[in-house]
Image: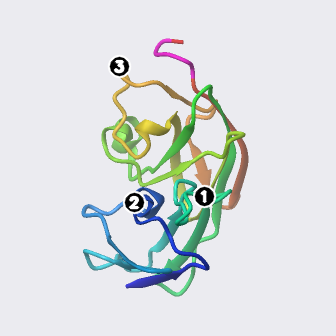
Amino acid sequence: RVELIFSEFIDVNSINKGIQVLPSFTKTPELIYKGKKIIIEFPDSLALNQTYIIVIDRSLTDENKVKIGKGIQVAFSTGDKIDDGLISGNVISSKMASVNLWKIKDDADMSSFYKRVPDYTINATDNGNFEFQFLSPGKYKVIGVESSSSGSILFPDRMVYGLPSRAYIQIGNEKKVNNVQIKIPDNRGG
């Protein structure tokens, strides 16, 4: 259980879209609203030695429907350390964009990762910037999508998406990978 305390009352209708816990769970954690407090109840037992990230997204609004200016990421760990890997960059898109990120499990996953729900997802800012914090060492695949496709399995023949020039991103000795550039075309095949 985690409690988030805000300085203002939150619009209850924005909570489920505005707060998520990453990496993704099979069953979504329950968000309980209590005035200026939101309680996150976890459905499953948490994995050992795992850094979890609570993402407070830009779609969270206060009682006056004012959105937060920039997303916030807060980490906690079930181990003795919080991972400190980072991937950041910019998405060029004519629409509101999100970035989906998968941690690659093995060689077979490298070619079929998009057939599963992304491990991490975050909305880009109005000027297209994005940043994933608190990542563990490993290989990652990143894809830019329209916000309506955020957090979804990728259907390459039916969705508009953009890829960076790199085949994958490695977090290891180099813990921070910056300037990842992604362009989302205006339509499929564009």
Q: 173 and 53: which one is in front?
A: 53
Amino acid found under the numbered disc labelled 1 = Val
- Give percent across and percent down for residue 13: 39, 60
Give x and y (percent) for residue 10. 50, 69
Residue 187 drawn in magenta: yes
Residue at label 1?
A: 66
Judge by depth and name the residue closer to the eye, 22 or 39: 39
The residue positioned farthest toward the front in the image shown = 64
Which numbered disc, 3 or 1, marks the residue that appears first in the sequence? 1
- Residue on which disc 2 sits: 13
Give the mark nearest the N terminus, 3 or 2: 2
Q: Residue at x 59, y 67 (%)?
A: 73
Q: Label 3 belongs to which residue?
A: 157
Magenta part, dominant SS: loop
Could you tell me how far apart the alpha carbons at marks 3 and 2 are, in whole angstroms?
33 Å
Label 1 crowding class (10 Å Cα cut-off): few <14, some 14-19, many 20+? few
Q: Secondary structure at mark 1?
A: loop
Say which of marks 3 and 2 sits in front: 2
